[in-house]
Amino acid sequence: MDTVTSLLDSIAGVGRDEQRGGYTRPVYSAAELDLRAWFVEQAGRRGLDVETDRNGIIWAWWGPPQAGALVTGSHLDSVPGGGAFDGPLGVAAALAAVDELRARGVEPRRSLAVTVFPEEEGSRFGVACLGSRLLTGAIDADKARNLRDADGNTFADVARQNGLDPAHLGADPEALARIGDFVELHVEQGRGLGEDGPAVAVGSSILGHGRWKLGIAGQGNHAGTTLMEDRRDPMVAAAQVILAVRQVAAAQPDARATVGRIQPVPGGTNVIASRVDLWLDVRHPDDAVTARLVETIHGKAQKIAAFEGCTVSLTEESYSGTVYFDPALQRQLENALPGAPVLATGAGHDAGVLAGYVPSGMLFIRNPTGISHSPEEFVEPADADAGSAALADALEALL
Ligand code: HGY
Ligand code: MN
Ligand code: MN
Ligand code: MN
């Protein structure tokens, strides 16, 4: 039987990012396609029947595809320079849990499926959990088809290049009905379990979170011939906006606001930018507070831009309200894992999108660094295996 660590070791070379460190595995990139092939091979080795649905979600079945099945899984795509565990841990633990259930001689009373959701990070097309949002209809199919990556490829084109029919992207009630209960195991992306806490926690909720694009337009010009007093430099405005984001969030308990991505246009060293796009990630337990934070930030950005002789536009790219996992399923997970603490998380997950449609729950595995979306993300091998054993306990209780 493979351990979770040996499964993860078998993909440790895929999508390594020598420049950033860690892994860069955007959806439908060569790296992520390699990981998909790895998953299909591992599932095949376990006699699981593999199918890919109209939205590119991979389902590996133990038992016939049927409504009301027990489903567990996560994602294989990553953020740029991400860690080894965010996503793949949940997939590897699910495969190891199938091995464990079989070793225990468990005869499932209902089918079990292990799933891989595409574009959970939203790193290529800008909308997080795109696969589960398509499956549930949480995103408009046309909006999804027209999403573009940094090279201008539409999601429709990339989906077509990967064997999907773009016309069929979108809500898939028959596939959704197959999920009777969904459980996602995931590396903890914070310090809830601490450096030496228990290996496994049960999830309770996910903070509401959204992404907005702020476009600041100024006057592009020559860096050498344009006097300082003649400038309308959007980079100067952007710098002040980023500081304002921190001030606004720091003043609001439980708020998180981040500018993790900024893109000057044209981006030349000797060129005053004509425009700067920056992406805002705001999260808070209360959706009304999140909305108010964004409004406050937008107002400050407008003042800053006006002072710098620039203009600013705000576009919402995606939003998920605060999600509470299914209480009955959460209790079943807690009963299956006596003594496991219960954790709220600030990170979004496909389980969070699905929670709006089917009973959905999560298990978190201790990350002694408390760091994620970074090469420093870590899980002790013993905790990874304890996680898959805990997942097997939870699945056995639910099968
Ligand atoms: O951004 C998130 O919270 C998730 O990791 N996609
Ligand atoms: Mn993840
Ligand atoms: Mn992530
Ligand atoms: Mn996530």
Image (cartoon, grey):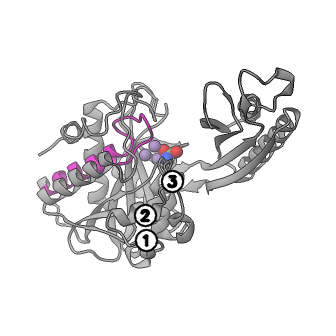
**Foreground label between 3 and 1:** 3
Which residue does the numbered mark 3 point to in the structure image? 152
Frontmost residue, 138 versus 329 = 138
Between the residue at mark 3 and the residue at mark 2, the CA separation in whole angstroms equals 10 Å
Which labelled disc corresponds to residue 157? 2
Q: Quadrant of residue 98?
A: bottom left
- The image position of residue 105, as x and y in percent, is 12, 59
Residue type of the residue flagged with mark 2: Asp
Q: Mark 2 to mark 1: distance in Å?
A: 8 Å
- Which of label 2 and label 1 is nearer to you? 2
Residue 194 location, quadrant: top left
Q: Are marks 2 and 1 in contact (CB under 8 Å)?
A: yes
Specify which label sits upstream in the sequence, 2 or 1: 2
Tell me if residue 103 comes above or below residue 188 in the rendering: below
- The answer to whether residue 358 shows anywhere in this view is no
Taking 388 as reference, is 240 left or right? right
Quick check: is 84 in the magenta stretch?
yes
Q: Is residue 107 left or right of residue 274?
A: left
Disc 2 crowd, CA 10 A, few/some/many (<14, 14-19, 20+): some
Quadrant position of the C terminus in the picture: bottom left
Residue 109 in view = yes
- Identify residue type, mark 1: Pro
Disc number for residue 166: 1
Q: Secondary structure at mark 3?
A: loop
Q: Which residues are magenta?
A: 75-102
Helix, strand or loop at disc 1? helix
Q: Residue at x 34, y 52 (%)?
A: 336
Front residue of 263 and 340: 263
Numbered disc total: 3
Identify the secondary structure beneath mark 2.
Answer: helix
The residue lying toward the viewer, choosing from 139 and 395, is 139
Identity, as a three-letter code, of the amino acid under mark 3: Gly
